[in-house]
Image (cartoon, rainbow, N blue to C red):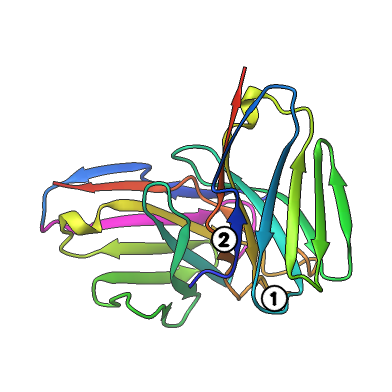
Amino acid sequence: GAVVSQHPSWVICKSGTSVKIECRSLDFQATTMFWYRQFPKQSLMLMATSNEGSKATYEQGVEKDKFLINHASLTLSTLTVTSAHPEDSSFYICSARPSTGPHYQPQHFGDGTRLSIL
Amino acid sequence: SQQGEEDPQALSIQEGENATMNCSYKTSINNLQWYRQNSGRGLVHLILIRSNEREKHSGRLRVTLDTSKKSSSLLITASRAADTASYFCATGGSHSGNTPLVFGKGTRLSVIA
């Protein structure tokens, strides 16, 4: 089945550091990937839609200069948290689904990245 | 913003019992999906029900959809300790896959052995 790999799974770093998170579709191509953020015991909140070969679309309240998204190929999207601060600590999850195939296909999620900023 | 509201927010049952979770949504949909999330992990797709379907089964899972009430339910029969997880309904996925899902708040299910 379709697999989405997210790396790293866990990051602890000092305030002011920039952190890059990768999201790869391993056995399918995806023109669109999504980045979500999840706080403890809460639901997933969409941060941005990553579009291959073009600029990402950010949700209201999400700073594009803070959360840089690059979708340079049909199998890889990256989220870079720039100059991270403790309030950026959260669980970040990406998702994607094949760009081709049946109409009704589910999104496939990475295993998430737990980011802890000290 | 969140489309769906699940209830209950938390549910604790004994192994072997059935677990029912409900989801309500606000706008018209093409389909509704249920996902499961183990603690600290990503989401796993469980089942998708189209807007023209009323009920769907997959193993021990049964999903119903009532578009007139804008609600769905997920029933897990003969629950097991391994079913302990958070369960989310989601709407908004498009045919092309370029529309994000909007998740409900989720139900945290605890199955006690």
> How far from the left and from the top, in percent, is residue A82?
20, 65
- Residue B102 lies left or right of residue B78; in this view the side is left
Q: Is residue B80 visible?
A: yes
Q: Are marks 1 and 2 in contact (CB under 8 Å)?
A: no
- Residue B108 lies left or right of residue B49; in this view the side is left
- Residue B103 lies left or right of residue B60; in this view the side is left
Three-letter residue code for mark 2? Gly
Q: Quadrant of the C terminus of chain B?
A: top right
Q: Is residue A106 visible?
A: no
> How far from the left and from the top, in percent, is residue B97?
65, 71
Residue A18 in the magenta stretch? The answer is: yes
What residue lies at 52% left-to-right and 67% top-to-bottom? A33
What residue lies at 86% left-to-right and 46% top-to-bottom? B57
Q: Earlier in the sequence, mark 1 or mark 2?
A: 1
> How far from the left and from the top, in percent, is residue B10?
54, 42
Furthest-top residue in this view: B113
Quarter occupied by residue B4: bottom right
Marks 1/2: CA–CA distance: 22 Å
Three-letter residue code for mark 1? Ser
Element type where label 1 sits in the image: loop
Q: Which residue is mark 1?
A: B96
Q: Which residue is mark 2?
A: B104
Q: Chain of mark 1?
A: B
Q: Chain of mark 2?
A: B
Between A30 and B16, which is closer to the camera in this rendering? B16
- Write the start and end of the magenta stretch as one range: A16-30
